[in-house]
Amino acid sequence: MSRKSGRIKLSTVEVYAILAPYIGRMFKDQLKACLPIVLYLLFFLLVVFRGEMTNPISFIPGILFVLVGLMFFMEGLRLGLMPFAETIGNTLPKKATIYTLLGFTFLVGVGATLAEPAIGVLKTVGNSVDYKRAPLLYDYLLNHTNTLVTMVAIGVGVATILGVLRFVKQWPLKYLIFPVLSAILIVTAYAHFVPELRSIIGLAWDCGGVTTGPVTVPLVLALGIGVTRARGASDTGMSGFGVVTLASLFPILFVMLSSVYLYHTGSINMEVTKLASESASTGVGTIITDAFYYAARAIIPLMLFLYLFQRFLLKEKNPRGNEILLGISFCLIGMAIFNLGLGFGLTPLGEKVGAAAPNSFAPPEMFYGAMWGKVVVLLFAFFLGYGATIAEPALNALGIAVENITQGAFKKYLLIHSVAFGVGCGITLGVVKMIFDIPLAYFLIPMYLLLIPITIISSEEFVNIGWDSAGVTTGPITVPLVLAMGLGVSCATSALDGFGIISLASVCPIIVVLTLGNYVERKVRKTS
């Protein structure tokens, strides 16, 4: 180490000694979350379902890309994005009108959605849809991707406005859930009775899970809590809860309405063919260039908007400029590498597992017979959902918050395992839906109708906890794997499409948590 002109110069060994523990900790966090799921899938693919990895050489770097990409991306969020949200959330209410505040929160919601890593999965899985059996879904995913992403982003923007208003006005979450849910169920029932629209239902409902990822949730929560504190609203311990629920519901409604509109205006090509939508094969260089282009298109506009808003409208400088710039760079690099990993690693793995699963019960293999083969697949689905949820870091944080809010009545471990059980049941029902080709509406509509009375009789605290618990289960690893697996199963069976598993993995935890919450509350009242 030497000092010259006031600057410290480090040798290569010293730089390594400083950075190695820092990078190792970040990589270890992602490895702990991802590796068990990957090993679980590989075990079932190669041993239980007796499938094959045709190109393992490309698969292994793909998984490493996912891990490294998430490592950089999550650290970039902490260094670059979150300081913006916290500073603006504390300052904006003091310097702006309510209309400026709401307009800003809408744009933040839209920008955060576009920056979600899982958003890129929607177009990736489009090529796996059977264009002959679901032409509307195929054309919507491949040729109207921008419309789909825009509808999801606008839905999150509207949800963010209502979330901030709710923080300020202290509105009960029930008052916001019921009108939106009623509209969604009505449009879902309508789409179910129009055969051409039926394939859109799973996509729309799964979009609700895609939105609640590592960008949208912490950014919107930081903004909302900052606004609440700055405006002097009382904090009941529930600040921040509920916005995840709204950010899940509104995209479903907007995607459903947009698909109905496109269908009735003839904008969807029902005669689409595979050749019309396939592009020529591209080289590795083009794939890498595209990955960085889409990452820059998602990250840079959001960060530039936040910077210009803070600098010129709020007229404030951020003292952590260099650190934020480093965070933005990490986000860009991380999302680009993560996108590469999706294409080379996670998505192919999920598709291969999904395609190999029917070998257990369907001819010509039928390794375990028609009945027991289906049992094996359903057990695989349940423990995939259960294990992936247990490993979700956000669920552990939610469990700690819930235990504190309920003063220990609802234990952290009880919440974690109840949510994991619900997710496992939901993914199992999703596989049942595909194996037996049951319309998704037959599951969703009755389950949400069941949720309405349960929600009515539940306290406001548990309504917030229960409905938000579904959002923490849909992370950047789980979503692409489950979507790809579902599409793989659908291609290997007679199922119309592979969407809907994420939506069922979201509703089941809500039912389980609210039911347990009511039980815990009654038990506390009896003992007090």
Image (spheres, rainbow, N blue to C red):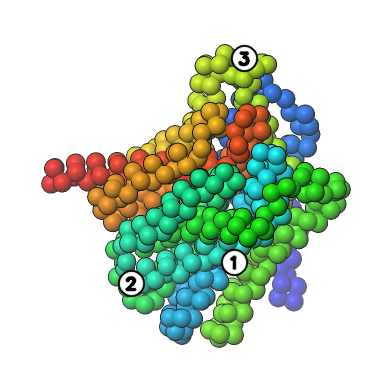
Name the residue carrying label 2: 169
**Number of callouts:** 3
Name the residue carrying label 1: 111
Q: Which mark is residue 298?
A: none
Please name the residue shown 47% across and 78% down the image: 101
Q: Amino acid at mark 3?
A: Phe
Judge left or right: residue 313 versus residue 421.
right
Q: Is residue 87 visible?
A: no
Q: Along the line of sight, which residue is nearer the eye, 392 or 324?
A: 392
Q: Position of residue 102 (x, y in %)?
A: 47, 75
Q: State the quadrant of the N terminus.
A: bottom right
Mark closer to the chain start, 1 or 3? 1
The alpha-carbon separation of the residues under discs 1 and 2 comes to 25 Å
Q: Position of residue 514 (x, y in %)?
A: 32, 45
Q: Secondary structure at mark 2?
A: helix
Q: Position of residue 297 (x, y in %)?
A: 70, 64
Q: Amino acid at mark 1?
A: Gly
Q: Is residue 131 visible?
A: yes
Mark closer to the chain start, 1 or 2? 1
Q: Position of residue 345 (x, y in %)?
A: 71, 40
Q: How busy is the neighbourhood of tag 3: few (under 14 within 10 Å), some, or many (20 plus)?
A: some
Q: Amino acid at mark 2?
A: Lys
Q: Are marks 3 and 2 in contact (CB under 8 Å)?
A: no
Q: Is residue 164 above or below residue 345?
A: below
Q: Secondary structure at mark 1?
A: helix
Judge left or right: residue 521 versus residue 21.
left
Mark closer to the chain start, 3 or 2? 2
Please name the residue shown 68% across and 16% down the image: 364
Name the residue carrying label 3: 367
Q: Is residue 439 above or below residue 286?
A: above
